[in-house]
Amino acid sequence: MRAAKVEAELANRTKSEFLANMNHELRTPLNAIIGFSGMLAQADAMDLDAEQVKGYAEYISTSAHKLLSVVNAVLELSAVQAGKIELIRDNVGMSVLIERALKNVEAAAAERDVAIEAVIEEEHDVDIYVDDEKIIKALANVIDNAARFSPEGAQVLVKWRAVDLHWVEITVRDAGAGMTPEEIQQAVTPFQQVSQGLNRKYEGIGLGLSTAKAFVELHGGALKVLSTPGQGTEVTLIVPIDNVRPVKLAATSQRSDRPEAAEPQPPQRSSA
């Protein structure tokens, strides 16, 4: 009973902290949209010139896209947890997948003055049978996290390799502050953040890694996090090339051997 009480209190505190962060992440762009749209509505009375009108419209557009990304992140993870995500699989080359993921985050990384370098360890491209939108979203989330927590002027390294005929590994390494094992667990747990409270240093609602983990696991893969405080973080997405048995991972920690995949079954294609 005591354990159940502690678990309930922890869940309630996590929920409260998440809602507090959501309050900030929703109100900020909403206030910008309301404020600048109100000014545009009074453009004649305020004697706004064309350049000012354009600037206010851009502020509204930027705030609306930020708000939409927050709402989408919550809805996506909620749909995964409710079992309402359907995978639409197709063949996609790893080079295309990496390129599209990088395009999704390059602007945000440039704003933070963080360079992203992609390294291919394979001589030939590899096709994987996945829901490319989900895997691209998962990888983009991981890269965006790495850029967000990297110091200004740092570099984020993205590389991939085929483990064998059944698996590929996509690794994202940053030179950020790193995390303890407890902080890693927080980072991959839905609705939790390593840095809590409205005075936290980094923006966001803390769903990047947990959503990436959920999307990869839906494919029968796994997400591995290795990190040491002061030495950066390495996140690896282990993705099946085709429909095979899920990866079995040991508990994520600062130091661990590479997880071994269970013996794969013969590839079977499916639209589910």
Image (tube, rainbow, N blue to C red):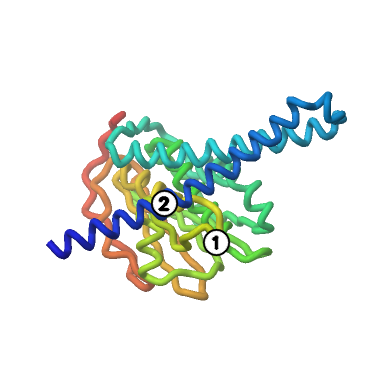
Between residue 175 and residue 90, name the one nearer to us.
175
Question: Residue at 41% across / 59% down in the picture?
Answer: 187
Q: Is residue 145 left or right of residue 153?
A: left
Q: Quick check: marks 2 and 1 in contact, CB under 8 Å? A: no
Vertical position of residue 54 compared to residue 207: above or below: above
Q: Which residue position is annotated with label 2?
A: 18
Q: Residue furthest front?
A: 45
| Mark 2 secondary-structure assignment | helix
Residue 178 spot, x, y in % from top left: 49, 69
Residue 60 spot, x, y in % from top left: 67, 34
Label 1 amino acid?
Answer: Asn
| Mark 1 secondary-structure assignment | loop
Q: Quadrant of the C terminus?
A: top left
Vertical position of residue 150 compared to residue 63: above or below: below
Question: Residue at 46% across / 58% down in the picture?
Answer: 171
Mark number for residue 199? Answer: 1
> Tag count in the figure?
2
Q: Quadrant of residue 192?
A: bottom left
Residue 228 spot, x, y in % from top left: 45, 73
Callout 1 crowding tier (Cα within 10 Å): few <14, some 14–19, many ≥20: few
**Alpha-carbon span between mark 2 and mark 1:** 14 Å
Between residue 236 and residue 15, name the one nearer to us.
15
Between residue 232 and residue 84, name the one nearer to us.
84
Q: Residue furthest bottom?
A: 230
